Image (cartoon, rainbow, N blue to C red):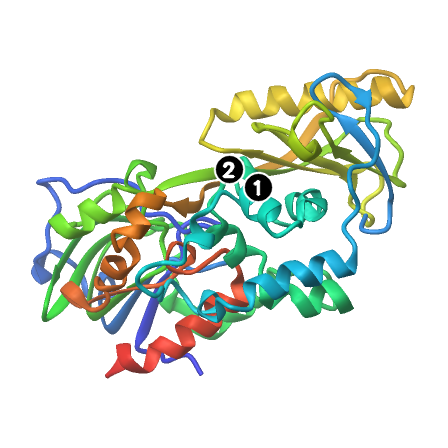
Amino acid sequence: MISRHILPLVVGPFLVASAFGGYSASLSFEDTDYGPEDLLVRDFLVLGGGASGTYARRAYVNFRNGQPAASPDQATIQGLLGYFDTLAQFPYLADGFDLPEPVPEDLLLPLGDYLEKYNLSSIAYFIFDQAQCQGNLLDQPTLYVAKYFGTVNKASVVHGYLTSARLNNSELYSASQKHLGSDVLLQSQILGLRRTGHGVTAIVSTPSGKKLVKAKKLISSISPQLDSGNLAGWDLSAKETSLFGQFNSSAYWTALVTNTGLSSSVMWKNTDPAQVLDIPRLPQAYVIFPTGTIENVLHVYYGSPYAIPEEQVRQDIVAEVQRVQALAGVPITQPEFLIMDAHIPFQCTVSTDAIRKGFYRDLNGLQGELSTFWTGAAFHTHDSSLLWQRTEKLLPSWLA
């Protein structure tokens, strides 16, 4: 059960809850400058929250030039089970970044080298398809890929994944919002934050005006990469600044497009025969495929190893859809975007040298400092169920 004494701030509608804006001398942390309805006193202030055509015929295309491509190596169950077996020696990957010291060198190998070492290169394209958002996959340290697509996925690969009955993952968050009621501040931004060992005070911008929130403790699931702007307004310590400044991240976009004329029964998958193991170098789209539920509307998933302007992403998607149109023999049109969402930053990583030197030991050491507790993908992985489990495990110690 969620306590009424925990105040979540949900910033933005989807996936990453970000705190934009910065501290200004005009901001007041004094109780007397706020009316009764704008002064919120809670035990906990929670920042962040939120997540995040299957049976169509597959066609493989080089999205760079619109040429058809042969099917890449097809992963077998035996190959995938072999991959999961190699990861079984690292059970701690399913529970945060509680890494042994020294960190096993296998986990620091680029994924391409790891798969080659264990004769598993035939499953590389399958992992590329399943573990999107990893930037250039084969370059990524195995540690991060294994946490995103690892032994916890074994049963799902063999038996199939579960989904919500109405195919609407957002129902979970709508139900949570209904339960929490006015304790959720939607479309809010952190303007200023003061933290001590005795409590937290936040100035929050909301559609109804600024509010002063006073809490005993703070829980944040915000992605803490410094150059993302997510922590603008925070009173970061030197230790936090040093650690968060080491993060790099990938970028991921999801879009719904229409006016394409493409078949509603074909999934177009990006494959590049000129690249190692047929895996395209990003930025590019991963796949273009029918929704399966909305006529003449296609999903597009697009990835990059780094953030790029949204306009470039739109231009690339239009060009790639038009190349597929030419290959499919349908009229070339101007695809229309119904919606496009950017998930940035995604998959925060640090260098393997930093990992060897104890980065995650030091990151975990932030828990409880300045009355602040951390969760979210940067402290585990982009898997909602694993994040819920990890947070639930740690919550009793945070409440103590």
| Residue of label 1 | 112
Element type at mark 2: helix
Image coordinates of residue 173 in percent, x first then y, are 53, 64
Q: Quadrant of the N terminus?
A: bottom left
**Mark number, residue 96:** none
Q: What residue lies at 74% left-to-right and 26% top-to-bottom?
A: 273
The first of marks 2 and 1 along the sequence is 1
Residue 130 drawn above or below residue 260:
below
Tell me the kind of residue under disc 1: Gly
Image coordinates of residue 372 in percent, x first then y, are 22, 64
Q: Is residue 140 left or right of residue 255?
A: left
Q: Is residue 37 visible?
A: yes
Image coordinates of residue 232 in percent, x first then y, are 24, 42
Q: Is residue 68 left or right of residue 246?
A: right
Check contact, mark 2 vs mark 1: CB within 8 A: yes
- Nearer to us of marks 2 and 1 is 1
Q: Nearer the viewer, residue 57 or 74?
A: 74
Residue 389 drawn above or below residue 244:
below
| Residue of label 2 | 139
Q: What residue lies at 14% left-to-right and 63% top-to-bottom?
A: 370
